[in-house]
Amino acid sequence: MKTKKIRRTILTIAILAVGYLGGRNNVLQNVFPATVATEQPAKQTPPVSPDYQAIADQDFKSGAAAYLPINNEQSQLTATDWQGEKIVYGQLDQLNRTTSVTAYLSKRNLGKSEGRTRQIWNPTGWHNQPLIVNGRRITPQNRGHLIAYTLTFNFDQNGNFQAGQPGSLDNPLNLATQSAYSNQKTMQIFEEKVRTALEANKKVIYKVTTVFRGNELMPRGYWVQAISTDGTLNFNDYVWNVEPGVAFDYMTGRSHLDASMQVKDGQNIVDRTKQQVKQLF
């Protein structure tokens, strides 16, 4: 009789305890931490392969940064392959599109924009219709140089060093249809790095490749990479060919207003990069 009473008491206590603890999940989680779902670490974005097709397959997402690091920002250029100032222009492809330009540059190749003449060459995808974006009239496309005009002085038309020659201004092998934002904002970041290194008497190998998808006539972006012979300058990035407030049909180069198209980086990143580069050299 006494044994049965003890058993009933223990059972009652157990039932009350289970009921109490069942409504207090936090208590159970503290007592039995193994049952708590652990937070999974955030997945890291895999680095983009330094391969043309892998880069061409990338899609820009509105609101993303204006450029994408490639190969962990490490150039694939070999400084020892070059002996003197020269520009190697890639030939136009079967659709008349630019391919790539590689230049070995020194301080002797720096020039100024003043006095440049008018450009007349229309690269593939050239449909520069003016648009009104946020109340401001813009021309969304530029004739963008692969190797910046101000970095190409003292070369002849074949890219051989020749003192006194003007920069490569209207060369079809060095021009592509580029968004105004990409040309005037984002590319400036990398061109400024090269320019500052040259001003510091460094020698730089600089390569720009236009990246097309399939048979599209307007590049999806510009693959830029450079290395100085002393290794202090080294970058490898993909510049998106995009324009805030504008969407492009890359097959034709035509554009239309698109308020949803936004780019994360603005002029402030250009100014900040200029200061950082000047401090570096």
Image (tube, grey):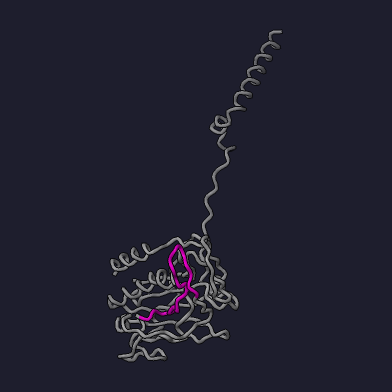
Left/right placement of residue 36 relative to residue 198 reads: right
Quadrant holding the C terminus: bottom left
The image shows residue 234 at horizontal and vertical percentages of: 39, 71
143 part of magenta stretch:
yes
Tell me what residue is drawn at x 46 percent, y 85 percent. 121
Q: Which residues are magenta?
A: 129-149
Vertical order, 42 against 232 (above or below): above
Left/right placement of residue 26 relative to residue 88 reads: right
189 part of magenta stretch:
no
Tell me what residue is drawn at x 44 percent, y 69 percent. 137
Tell me what residue is drawn at x 44 percent, y 63 percent. 135
Vertical order, 21 against 173 (above or below): above
Q: Residue 162's image quarter?
A: bottom left
Q: Residue 66's image quarter?
A: bottom left
The image shows residue 3 at horizontal and vertical percentages of: 69, 11
Quadrant holding the N terminus: top right
Left/right placement of residue 279 relative to residue 29 reads: left
The image shows residue 214 at horizontal and vertical percentages of: 60, 76
